[in-house]
């Protein structure tokens, strides 16, 4: 049960963002920019970073939501599961393995990111911008995971919910839907 009153039809971070739309606006804009904006990393790769960090933070809502989004963007579901299990052996590029390593270090503590980890990523072809964005996405998802779990938001267990959420994320991005979320009351 959530620690504060939230709309029952809006589980996870969506309910929190609707609760404080004023603070939600910059959060949504930053997320949209980082995960859907111009980048040399694909949207699927950026969702993999979000998924890995959320998984390591044991945030079930965010892990499941971003797994669904990554799976849709990658067009398959095996890679995401393998990244969560062990990104070093997952079927991703060496550059992506190095960036996921940086993200995993950020998830532990930003000070864990070593010059060796950065050099590994650069040697594998990562640009300074990709390193910057990886660290920022990882840090941002640490915030989101703590936000969702710290206020004990509702975490659905039905796979169909996350399939729909993954579709909404990949279709509409992270901006607030223009018509809001009242249409979801009927589905709740």
Image (cartoon, helix red, strand yellow):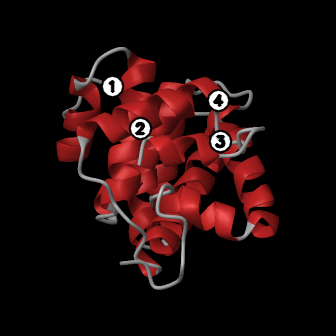
The reply, left or right, for residue 75 in relation to residue 128 is left
The CA span between labels 1 and 3 is: 25 Å
The CA span between labels 3 and 2 is: 16 Å
Image coords of residue 166 (percent x, y): 44, 33
**Disc 1 to disc 4: CB gap under 8 Å:** no
Say whether disc 1 or disc 4 marks the residue closer to the N-terminus. 1
Q: Mark 4 points at which residue?
A: 172
The kind of secondary structure element at disc 1 is loop
Near mark 4 (Cα within 10 A), the count class, few <14, some 14-19 or many ≥20, is few
The kind of secondary structure element at disc 3 is loop
Say whether disc 4 or disc 2 marks the residue closer to the N-terminus. 2
Disc 1 versus disc 3: nearer the observer: 3
The kind of secondary structure element at disc 4 is helix
Q: Name the residue under label 3.
A: 174
The CA span between labels 1 and 2 is: 10 Å
Image coords of residue 30 (percent x, y): 74, 51
**Disc 4 to disc 2: CB gap under 8 Å:** no
The residue nearer to you, when weighing 105 against 5, is: 5
Image coords of residue 176 (percent x, y): 72, 45
Q: Name the residue under label 1.
A: 92
Near mark 1 (Cα within 10 A), the count class, few <14, some 14-19 or many ≥20, is some
Is residue 124 something that shows in the picture? no
Q: In this view, does 50 lie above or below 178?
A: below
Q: Mark 2 points at which residue?
A: 48
Q: Residue furthest front?
A: 186
């Amino acid at each position: 049960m959530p620690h504060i009153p939230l709309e029952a039809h809006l589980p996870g971070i969506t309910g929190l963002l609707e609760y404080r739309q004023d603070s939600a606006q910059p959060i949504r804009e930053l997320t949209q920019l980082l995960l859907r904006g111009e980048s040399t990393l694909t949207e699927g790769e950026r969702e993999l970073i979000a998924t890995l960090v959320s998984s390591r933070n044991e945030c079930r809502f965010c892990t499941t939501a971003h797994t669904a989004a990554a799976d849709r963007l990658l067009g398959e579901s095996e890679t995401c599961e393998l990244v969560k299990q062990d990104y070093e052996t997952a079927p991703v590029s060496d550059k992506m393995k190095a960036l996921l390593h940086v993200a995993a270090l950020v998830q532990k503590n930003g000070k864990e990111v070593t010059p060796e980890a950065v050099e590994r990523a650069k040697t594998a072809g990562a640009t300074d911008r990709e390193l910057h964005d990886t660290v920022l996405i990882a840090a941002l998802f640490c915030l989101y995971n703590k936000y969702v779990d710290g206020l004990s938001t509702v975490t659905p267990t039905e796979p169909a919910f996350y399939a729909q959420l993954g579709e909404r994320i990949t279709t509409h991005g992270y901006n607030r839907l223009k018509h809001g979320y009242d249409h979801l009351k009927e589905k709740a």
